[in-house]
Amino acid sequence: MKQIISKIIKDVIPSSSEEKSKNKIAELALELVEKEVRKYPEIIGLEFGGSFAKGTWLSKDADVDIFVRFKKSTSEADFEKISKKVGFDSLKKYSPYVRYSEHPYVEANIKKTKINVVPFYDVKVGQWKSAADRSTFHTKYMKKSLTPKMKNEVRVLKTFLKINGIYGAEIAKQGLSGYVSEVLILNYGTFENVIKSISKIKENEVIGKATKKFDTAIVIIDPIDGNRNLAAAISDENLGKFVLISRAFKEKPKLEFFKNKKSKISKKHWQNMLVVKFDFKIRSPDIIWGQIKRATSSLTTQLELAGFNVLRSSSHTDQQKEAYLFFLLESRRISQIYAKKGPEFFREDSAKSFIFKNRKNSEIMWIGNDQKIVSIENRKHIEADKFLAYFLKNNLKTGIPKGLEADFKKGYKISIGDKNLSKSIKEAASELISTNGTFLHFN
């Protein structure tokens, strides 16, 4: 394993020329922002943050985060208004645009480097007013705590996570963030130790010092905030991939673990893929991703209640106009009849009520071996696409988040299979009918 890691380290450490180039871009951006912040007494400082400031950035992929420090007394309205104005005015030559986390921030590209202008409040540890308030404390803590060797170990871990598709804290990905990578290296010392520890991690295991109990598969404590569980933002699927890929790498360390491994698609299952497509009014990526994920979850529940077994589901958006909800069904067509189970016959009132409510629509009614009354009834819908069309037409508010109602009212399309899907959308949907590359490492 050590030989593999030493080879990877050489590739992920930025060269001196890359460092000079990145520093020039960062200083240029800082100067531009500095000129603008002088106009506002609410702003009391600027500083670099993120992986660039900590020295954990990857050679071919590094944003430059400029954090704008606001007085604690600044109102939320002024906080957002002034930070956007500073961002847009300072980066106006580079086509700036707004991105959203808890609060909006401005992003632009200078020579293929993303520049983020992020506002935060000047507060003490634990007195957070915005999500970004912790970030500068993270930067100071990691700069002080990570040795030069550990910073390079972070780079190896980030590369490992990225190649295997589980890197990134954004809601679209729900993977492991750069900060989580730093916390893991800080706890375990090296990439090799992280792999060995994660490969044998137990459910509910706590990494770090917690000040309270958390209800997640594992717990990763933020070292500057014992009340914050970093693992809460990681999906179970991505956590599972991390554990499995760590086990596979520990057993048979190979360079191919740092190379893209294609998933294996089972094309015969396209016939059971239900697709909902709609257009939306443009909004921030985090907001639209949150909405379509909630819509997918809600419609999965409705399909299940109607008798359609949803094996997997996911969502996708181009973040500009189109959104898709995907549902892989056990079968797109189900039986005309189903067994409706009622209460045990000993429960007098409940039994009487069940018989009274269901006798009209019941084809057969009997008492089962478990003492429960059973009624055989006919389904209204036996085809998934027709059921969903009926449901959305008549129950839009039940199945769709409020923020998407206006978009759905303008129209949507429901289809089966991949016939009308573009290449990129087919690729996104095919994840539901694929064996992820993580599992293929066990061959």
Image (cartoon, rainbow, N blue to C red):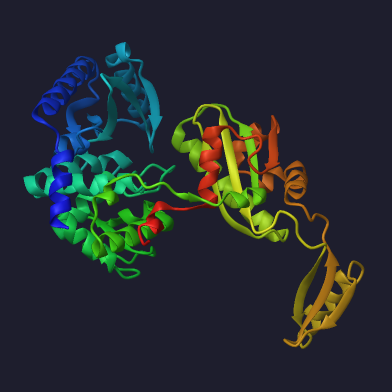
Residue 296 image offset from top left, x and y in percent: 58, 48
The image shows residue 214, relative to residue 264, as above or below, that is below
- Say left or right for 140 vs 164: left
The image shows residue 208, relative to residue 10, as above or below, that is below
Q: Residue 324's quadrant in the figure?
A: top right
Q: Nearer the viewer, residue 339 or 220?
A: 339
The image shows residue 230, relative to residue 206, as above or below, that is above
Q: Is residue 141 visible?
A: no
The residue furthest top is 93
Q: Quadrant of the C terminus?
A: bottom left
Q: Residue 396's quadrant in the figure?
A: top right
Residue 285 image offset from top left, x and y in percent: 45, 34
Residue 372 image offset from top left, x and y in percent: 76, 82
Q: Quadrant of the N terminus?
A: bottom left
* Number of numbered callouts drawn: 0
Residue 115 image offset from top left, x and y in percent: 27, 25
Q: Is residue 384 visible?
A: yes
Q: Residue at x 33, y 67 (%)?
A: 213
Q: Nearer the viewer, residue 5 or 152?
A: 5
- Say left or right for 149 vs 43: left
Q: Residue 130's quadrant in the figure?
A: top left
The residue furthest front is 443
Q: Residue at x 29, y 28 (%)?
A: 116
Q: Residue at x 29, y 19 (%)?
A: 86
Q: Residue at x 35, y 57 (%)?
A: 441
